[in-house]
Amino acid sequence: MGQIELKGVAKRFGDAEVIPPLDLKIEDGEFVVFVGPSGCGKSTLLRLIAGLEDVSGGKIEIDGRDATAERPAQRGLAMVFQSYALYPHMSVRKNIAFPLKMAKVPQAEIDAKVNNAAEILNLASYIDRRPGQLSGGQRQRVAIGRAIVRNPQAFLFDEPLSNLDAALRVNMRLEITELHNTLKTTMIYVTHDQVEAMTMADKIVVLQAGKIEQVGSPLDLYNHPKNRFVAGFIGSPKMNFMTGAEAAKHDAHEIGFRPEHIAVGETGDWKGKVTVSEHLGSDTFLHVDTEFGIINVRANGNVDVHHGDTIWMTPDRSKVHRFDAAGNTL
Ligand SMILES: Nc1ncnc2c1ncn2[C@@H]1O[C@H](COP(=O)(O)OP(=O)(O)O)[C@@H](O)[C@H]1O
Ligand SMILES: [Mg+2]
């Protein structure tokens, strides 16, 4: 079981309150992603759960027991970091086996567990290599293997893919998702990348300045952001925001349209000049200079519009997001 509950958990470093008291419940088997801009407290929150930092207030429960005062090793959680933290002089096998060796697990059991982890992670053919002889993705898999053999109640990942190049990141993203499908163990995954959050999570926790802005499924957050911050943070390219007369038309202080909800045509509601056109084949991304500032448009397939063209745009007004002066969704 790997149910984790935070009750009024807070963290201060000296005078700085990095995490104001917050409540959060993570169900057994869930894949939860903490996402937010750099410095918002994601790592701190994860480290509090892991026991690598002490809480300044509140309670952490793991499977219903009060784990607030437990040391990291007692909590039954395994953490995987961005820096793989492997032992360079040890083979893959020894790196993966390390926590079991430390725990004085019998050798036969160690062998079975290491082989099983290597199998799951496609590391079997690299088992005798040292970390220096592996690619970044393979090293990260070794670090994950070392977590798997501990058979944890939950895996805690802190930006594990940040050191990898873009193609490898996409690959490892799929592998971690598949790993979750296989193991069905609770996973808490920290990232600043909303695409990782959207593609991997059962449940996303959006953080800003240590505060939970919204908790929900990826499409919940995309379709029903609670406020302007979440609306602007989730979705790529970002939502377009407007105030003034355009917002007044929708009886709001501010409105937002996602780039994919704006159509390009010969006529339309808004006129603008294309400053950049990105043709990916599958999609066309346009940056259009208008009286409202730059508007991002995303069209399906290839659209024959180029830098310097003057175009018209029409938003799908049924898809408008409306906000009040405080930034809350109306
Ligand atoms: N040990 C520490 N001492 C003082 N401030 C810290 C410490 N660790 C983190 N912080 C501060 O807490 C805030 C959140 O940091 P962090 O949790 O690392 O953010 P994130 O992982 O979201 O980028 C930052 O302002 C950071 O400077
Ligand atoms: Mg961090």
Image (tube, rainbow, N blue to C red):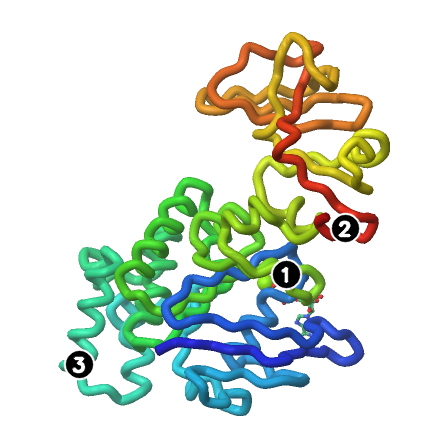
Mark with earlier residue (1, 2)? 1
Which residue does the numbered mark 2 point to in the structure image?
A: 327
Q: Is residue 316 above or below residue 75?
A: above
Find residue 207 and name its label: 1
Spatial separation of the CA atoms under disc 3 and disc 2: 56 Å
Spatial separation of the CA atoms under disc 1 and disc 2: 16 Å
Whole-percent x and y of residue 56?
67, 84
Q: Amino acid at mark 3?
A: Glu
Question: Which residue is more in the foreground, 10 or 278?
Answer: 10
Find residue 109 and name its label: 3
Question: Which residue is more in the foreground, 323 or 184?
Answer: 323
Question: Which residue is more in the foreground, 30 or 254?
Answer: 254
Q: Going 67% across and 78% down the picture, which residue do you hit?
A: 11
Q: Is residue 103 left or right of residue 300?
A: left
Whole-percent x and y of residue 111?
17, 75
Of badges 1 and 3, the one in the foreground is 1
For ligand 1, tell me if the residue under mark 1 lies within 8 Å.
Answer: yes
- Name the secondary structure under disc 3: helix
